[in-house]
Image (spheres, rainbow, N blue to C red):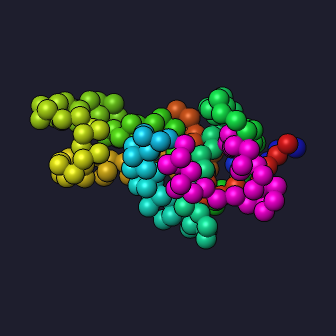
Amino acid sequence: MGQPCDTIRLYSAQADAVLQVLERDGVSFSKAEYVRGKYGESAPIFLTAYSWFVSRMEKIVPRPQGAEFPYWAFGALYSVDRTGTGETLALDVPLDQAVLFDLYDWNKIMQLRYLGEDEQEERLFQRELARCGLRETDVMLTGFHPQWKERVLESWERLFRHHDRIRKGDLSGVGGVQAGLWQIRSEWIRR
């Protein structure tokens, strides 16, 4: 028996603490403090990308009370990082609860890189920066280059260019599906 057409099968690795909350409350929300704790000195990079994502995500899927940051889920089991503790969950998520995008686009954002229409546009942007003696991380993590930072942030809007097509099952032009979820609900878990 297949999954209903108003859901998408996603996979997400979750820590034991999340599993315990799901068992106790039936729903779990991610918090900013978890990101700070997990990534330590690298947290500013993650918080820059996550904060931007959150501001855009809530325009697509309303943020429920209690949610601060998204959980990450993937369209393919092999895309899940299973090196931590906990369990990898198979989830049937209602389509209206997931923000869907190309995981390779998100990786570029996590590297604080410019997200071009194509690789050629990205290379041209990097060459422009190099001519000014700059790198994308310099631009994004300091307040010294606001005009360059604005160009990078504007480019990140392209992250959502595939959302509607993925929802309809069209994966053309998508290297791999990733999703942001405000919450994980116990009724979404498939065993």
Quadrant of the image for the N terminus?
A: top right
Q: Nearer the viewer, residue 166 or 125?
A: 125
> What residue appears at the point 43 percent right and 50 percent down from the top-left corner?
47
The answer to if 23 sits in the magenta stretch is: yes
Instruction: Classify residue 29 by image quadrant.
Output: bottom right
Residue furthest to the left:
132
> Residue drawn 69% across and 43% down?
15
Q: In terms of image quadrants, where is residue 86?
A: top right
Above/below status of 40 relative to 29: above
Q: Nearer the viewer, residue 171 or 177?
A: 177
Extent of the magenta region = 10-38
Quarter of the image where one finds residue 138: top left
Residue 180 appears in the figure? no
**Apparent side of residue 127 relative to residue 107 in the rendered image (left or right):** left
| Residue appearing at x 53%, y 54% in the figure | 33
Quarter of the image that includes the C terminus? top right
Question: Can you give x and y, in whole percent of width and height, for residue 42 in the image?
Answer: 42, 39
Q: Residue 37: horizontal and vertical position, in percent?
A: 53, 46
